Amino acid sequence: MRCNCNYENEWQLSGRETDLVEFYDYMAFRYFEIHCPANTVFSDTVCAEIRHYPMQEESCVFQTDDPQANQIFEICRRGVMLGTQEAFLDCPSREKGQYLCDGTITAHAHLLLTGDPAMYRKMLFDFAASAQIDPGLMAVAPGNEMQEIADYSCQYPEQLLPYYRLTGDTDTLRRLMPVVDGVERYFDAHRNDNGLIENLTGKWNLVDWPENLRDDYDFELSQPIGPGVHNVINAFYYGLKKNADEIRALLGLPLRNELGALRRAFFDAFRKDDGLFRDAVGSEHSSLHACALPLYYGITAETDIPATVRLIQTKGLCCGVYMAYFVLKALVRAGRKDIMAQLLLNNSDHSWKNMLREGATTCFEAWGKEQKWNTSLCHPWASAPVILLLEDIAGIQTERPGVFSFGHPFFPDGITSIHVKISTPHGTLKKNITPS
């Protein structure tokens, strides 16, 4: 397959009129060929079963007067649908494993697309169970792949908060708070005297994947990592602290109130005179990742936001499809939905439109087939447009946890009408939206 996997099955037919082939496991494919010896009589009826966790196509509808925006939504919707099997799979054709980062994007998108929180909740408890192996959580669960990725572990409380916002399930929030505490203690143990994470050798520091989409991030990431202090893991660490305290506030628990000191240490280590952040202590390079993540988490000073926005606008999506979620959401949080929409719908080689040009029917692992040596052609971690189109363009919001409504829509250039319908845990929400 394109993602560097080969499926090989051989079987001997019984000679009866009908044979049922029982495969070892389900397989992803786009077409098949049947080769028969000469003069062989072969039935013209072949059936294959399409399998995925239940998702009704009509459970979520997003239509605009921009055909390509609709196509982007559709390849992402199908990616989430087919990638959701017994778990939120990294991809259904290669790993067939649930990675912790999939909770940030895929689980969020799946709940918006279906109104069904069961898989999201299962994922949260799957990774909570991995704390028995390591309180800093495994990168893959359930499964026997002993992989650990620091960036992903920091996002666990960030996944709890949208789940709570979209469902109102306080009980799950309360039950999983001890897991958040354990993750926080794990990372706290790797702080240096300034309070920043340094030489975190026990887990892979990913930054982004594949390596060629890290925007020349100036820090040695091969394992064992370091030595030194770099930006991205500390931005994620700040996000871990911020989200953990937000959960504590929701549950009426004492706050740790460490963000002020951590933000000052982050500024001292990484801020440059031009208002941008450097990749690492000792570097003068400002990658997209090193600037977008601090903006996303609210680390960036108000006066520095314009410089960061200019950098993002100049660089575009010179990152992977996974990091694109944080870049685009950072622009939303900075009040620049206009630039977010330009990048979301851009026409470059680093775009969802490029996937369409290359014949995508589901969202890819990278922006194009040749941008990674084994690009999978169904990778739900590229489904950020589902979230952005529904929440930040159509304006779907939660008035209070579990209760959805329509807020203020945003109309990118070329879009003058939006028809949207979603199923929520408490009913169906639909609306035809035009500029007021």
Image: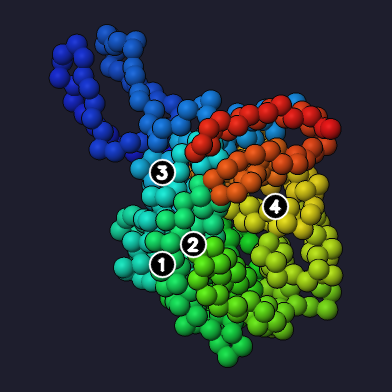
Q: Quadrant of residue 118?
A: top left
Sort mark 3 into few (<14), some (14-19) or many (20+) by Cα contacts within 10 Å.
Answer: few
Q: Which residue was labeled with disc 1? A: 179
Please tell me whether mark 4 sits on a helix, a strand or a loop.
Answer: helix
Mark 1 residue type: Val
- Residue 156 tag number: 2
**Can residue 361 be seen by looking at this rendering?**
no
First along the sequence among labels 2 and 3: 3
Measured as percent of width and height from the top left, residue 85 is found at 39, 40
Q: Nearer the viewer, residue 180 or 50?
A: 180
Q: Mark 2 or mark 1: which is in front?
A: 1
Which quadrant does the N terminus fall into?
Answer: top left
Q: Amino acid at mark 2?
A: Tyr
Q: CA distance from mark 4 to mark 3?
A: 27 Å
Mark 2 or mark 1, earlier in chain: 2
Residue hosting label 3:
118
In the displayed structure image, the side of residue 281 where residue 206 appears, left or right: left
Q: Kindly report the distance in space between the C-alpha atoms of the residues bearing marks 4 and 2.
A: 20 Å
Question: Marks 3 and 4: in contact by CB < 8 Å?
Answer: no
SS for callout 1: helix
Mark 4 or 3, closer to the camera: 3
Camera-near label (1 vs 4) is 1
Foreground residue among 287 and 36: 287
N-terminal label among 4 and 3:
3
According to the picture, the residue beneath numbered tag 4 turns out to be 328
Disc 3 to disc 1, how far (Cα)?
19 Å
